Amino acid sequence: MGDALDSLVMLLDIEPIEVNIFRGVSPNEPRQRVFGGQVAAQSLMAAGRTVDQGRVHSLHAYFLRPGDPNAPILYEVDRIRDGRSFTTRRVVAIQHGRAIFNLSTSFHIEEEGLEHQMPMPEVPRPENLKTFQERLAPWADQIDETLLRARSIDMRFIGELPWDEPARSRPPRQQLWIKADGELPEDPLLHACIVTYASDMTLFDSILMPHSIRWDDPRFMGASLDHCMWFHRPFRADGWLLYDQESPVAYGARGLARASLFTERGDLAVSLAQEGLVRYRRASKAG
């Protein structure tokens, strides 16, 4: 593994401090709040470390408060049910005595049943696309240098970058290939956690694409509200996954994004949905 991916794996190696209680930390980065994908992935890791059988098949989570990147996060796991086929856990992430994140997740043993799926879209191969750093190179003197450093997740965007020409409205659709930038150990829970981490990096952007606005617009306030994932088939996070995203609606200061993750051979591995806050900031009153 490269240094960036190694750091991510260490970030997900949360510390057990008591029965059903784990402690996680945030990377030493200049962030105003904890990255949502981090707290979701650490929560899933905490749940998975209390499960004896089965693989994660779904998670449903709510972002309750912004996380403090300078303070540790406690993950309290509630062992809701241990069944013959399904195991259910609830995880609450806590900082400064208050819940910042809540996750419910379920694990399922391998079984045979009905099978079908929608086909994978036809897209360019990832090796034929420029790296994220290569795509950003023309703006190197205008952007934060942290965006140009080595990253734990290799992202190859198909078509325009989400923040290209923000004044122009575009369809609410985005496609990119993602994978962990290095080889991972044989641990299905780790692979699921890394994809959970990566899934929150770009999904929200599809909501903004039809609108003449960017994350750094001072008029705009955006934040993830909830995040849902369904894990259909085994996959490897260190193999290429097509992240096919779309936003069907935004209304009432909330926008919905949904997506599919396909393996290179076209297997639908994961389905996702996320709702986000999309609000114009209220003007402050003088005096």
Image (cartoon, rainbow, N blue to C red):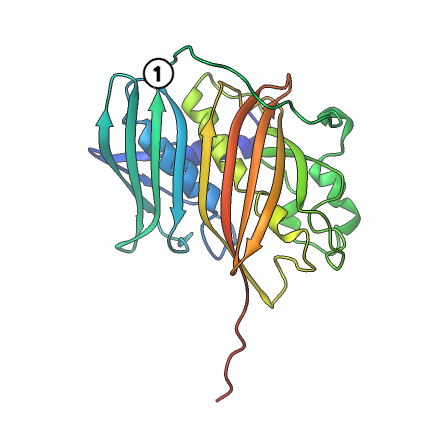
Q: Position of residue 170 (x, y in %)?
A: 73, 50
Evaluate whether residue 221 shows in this view.
Answer: yes
Q: Position of residue 179 (x, y in %)?
A: 60, 28
In the image as oriented, which residue stretches furthest toward the left? 19
Image quadrant of residue 113? Answer: top left
Question: How many residues crowd mark 1 within 10 Å: few (<14), some (14–19), many (20+)?
Answer: few
Q: Position of residue 150 (x, y in %)?
A: 63, 37
The quarter of the rendered structure image containing the N terminus is top right
In the image as oriented, which residue stretches furthest toward the right? 138
In the image as oriented, which residue stretches furthest toward the top? 112
Check disc 1 and give the amino acid type.
Ile
In the rendered image, the vertical position of residue 46 relative to residue 210, given as above or below: above
In the rendered image, the vertical position of residue 188 relative to residue 130, given as above or below: above
In the rendered image, the vertical position of residue 120 relative to residue 275, given as above or below: above
Query: Horizontal placement of 245 versus 137: left or right?
Result: left
Pick whichever, 209 or 235, lies toward us.
209
Numbered-mark total: 1
Q: Residue at x 61, y 57 (%)?
A: 215
Mark 1 falls on what kind of element? loop
Pick whichever, 136 or 101, lies toward us.
101
Image quadrant of residue 103? Answer: top left
Query: Horizontal placement of 21 versus 247: left or right?
Result: left
Q: Residue at x 58, y 24 (%)?
A: 182
In the image as oriented, which residue stretches furthest toward the bottom? 287
Evaluate whether residue 27 shows in this view.
Answer: no
Q: Position of residue 193 (x, y in %)?
A: 45, 31
Q: Residue at x 35, y 20 (%)?
A: 108
Residue under numbered circle 1: 109
